[in-house]
Image (spheres, rainbow, N blue to C red):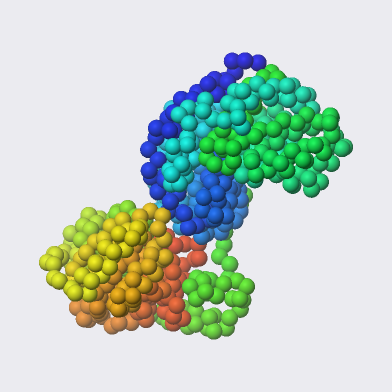
Amino acid sequence: MSGTYYDGELAELGNTFFAAMSANIEPLKLAIASAAESSIIGVGSGGSFTVASLLCNLHELYTGRVSRPSTPLEIICNPTLAASSPVFMISAEGKNPDIIEVLERARRHSSRTVHVVTNRGSSPLMEHVRELPEVTPHVFELAKKDGYLATNSLLLDAVLIARAYGALHSEAVQFPESLDGLRIGSHSVQEWLTGAQDFVRQAVPRKGLIIVFSPLLRPVAADLESKLSESALLYTQLADIRSFAHGRHLWLAERAQDCAILALVEPGVERLWARMQELLPSGVPVCTMPLGGGRPQDLLAGLVAQMRLVSLIAAEMGKDPAKPHVPSFGRELYYVDLPSFIPGPEDAGRRGEQSKFEVLGARWPSIGANGAMSRALASFESALALQPFRAIVFDYDGTLCSSQRKDSPPSGPIVERLMRLLDAGIVVGVASGRGDSIQGHLRDVLPREAWSKVHLGLYNGGWIGLLDGEIDKGVVTNEFLSHVRRILGRLESLGVPIERVRETYPHQISVRFKEGANAENMWFVIADSLRQAGLDPSTVVRSKHSVDVLAANVNKSHLVANMIQARGIDPYEIVTMGDQGAWPGNDASLLEHRFSLSVDQPSRRLDRGWKLAPHHKRDVDATLWYLDHAEIDPLAGSFRFELGT
């Protein structure tokens, strides 16, 4: 069968390859670089699962970090899989209800960093992306929609990801200029397909195909299995070359007339497969696809070759795999409302204890039942519930705003709750390592009449004033910070991945790192450099994306002291809230306050700085949860927390 819709899609692959090679991949490359020190989770269905598998294979190849391609259902059933790893979700059209549910659960229930790779800027998925914090979209538009099977969208996304890894490892020059340059062993893709035609004629009547593969080529094998199974062309089994030897070979003894074998091999397993092939029954058709390795260009060659192999198999059967008849029950299966049947996760154990154990380094299986921890939690919860508060001090990034690299004002829901507090006469303070940009953002979203009620502690408490005040930007020399700046200059010359150094004399110096650098690791680099120079490293604090070196006597707790004095508020009538409560986190001094709450990492002290929001809620989500559990008494100008059990 020739001239099928599927063949028309394959004819477009060359144009898609050119578009992918011409696209701007810088944001995607930075996203991948930012995960260089982590394992990653790739999520997708069908053809998008292939892209997720390719992503994870390349990540393992180049970083050595074990990474996992996952179906949406795996994450839906267990969102904690994504709790500590960056998540890359792949969806060509953004209409798959499963991937939309994964996005909701991963972001709201566990994961910290989510990237979405899609080929549609306008889709149900993108509507959800825009509503959730710390979700970064990577949109690469594809003009023509795929048919039933993923073809051009798969190639587009695969080439983009392959280019990103190749560029990060100086291999971009090894990509061919066109699809014609892709190689299967010493042959072009078309030459290899010509040689495979006799195998196809023998395999199709048997109706079953066993695909054995090198682990480095898993994405190619996974996509071939997906295409043959989803289009009901052949029944397929997948096994890596050695797993096949552990029992699956019995098919060749018991049902040889039902089997053919396709082997995906690369130089590391060629000799092994040659020996294994010698041992196979002579009557079973065998075809080998020899690829050059597990590099990006090798995987792309395999993906293109197997797409075209599917065309040969479909032609032998007289089918168009891009235009099958999909029964009504199939559509109903696809659009099953997952949240109705698989409820979201519930917190395990007592609220607050898990995050406290984690920050203390006491992880399973050592935590178990701990009387001291339980008593400390009960004591703090009891005292918190009884205490009325007349003021609240927030950290900014990661507490009132999502802790991402872009500079943005608080969201509508946060502003609404801040106004509830201010309208009730409750004093609000905001402490941040940043400066006048915070003042500008808050002025943009809060009415002018509220400005005099909001206290600011900017530059980590180096400047203290009101929202309606003017920041003194006069530069005052600070010998300690000047010395620090010289040290940072030397680190930059040595190749330390510093993106920007911002000097705010006499308060602090802020260091922002390039995408991919781990701020926790960079803290050690900078603190150790100060120590080697005979300087005190105890003033070096970090956030999720930067490190600040503070001048002596600069910290966020000074804002609390100022509000106590200026407003005549009892210290116990102020509650503080931040996301980095364990030193050297930049909210450690803020969460040293007697009544303090964490929205992410708690203090290591047991009498304060607890994270009492549900474990799956972090950052802004946790802040909203706390504020939604604040019972305001407008007559008294105070509130209490009713956190429940």
Using residue 350 as the reference point, say whether residue 167 is left or right of it.
left
Q: Is residue 278 above or below residue 617?
A: above
Residue 297 image point, x, y percent: 52, 37
Q: Residue furthest top?
A: 2
Q: Quadrant of the N terminus?
A: top right
Q: How many marks?
A: 0
Residue 152 image point, x, y percent: 51, 29
Residue 28 visible from this viewpoint: yes
Q: Nearer the viewer, residue 634 or 363?
A: 363
Q: Quadrant of residue 447?
A: bottom left
Q: Nearer the viewer, residue 222 or 182?
A: 182
Q: Residue furthest left?
A: 474
* Residue at 54% in and 54% down: 64
Q: Is residue 175 above or below residue 77?
A: above
Q: Is residue 288 above or below residue 468?
A: above
Residue 392 visible from this viewpoint: no
Q: Nearer the viewer, residue 257 or 455?
A: 257
* Residue at 78% in and 29% down: 285
Using residue 125 as the reference point, say whether residue 408 is left or right of it.
left
Q: Nearer the viewer, residue 521 or 209?
A: 521
Q: Is residue 180 above or below residue 626?
A: above
* Residue at 60% in and 23% down: 190
* Residue at 43% in and 44% down: 170
Residue 55 image point, x, y percent: 53, 45
Residue 298 image point, x, y percent: 56, 37
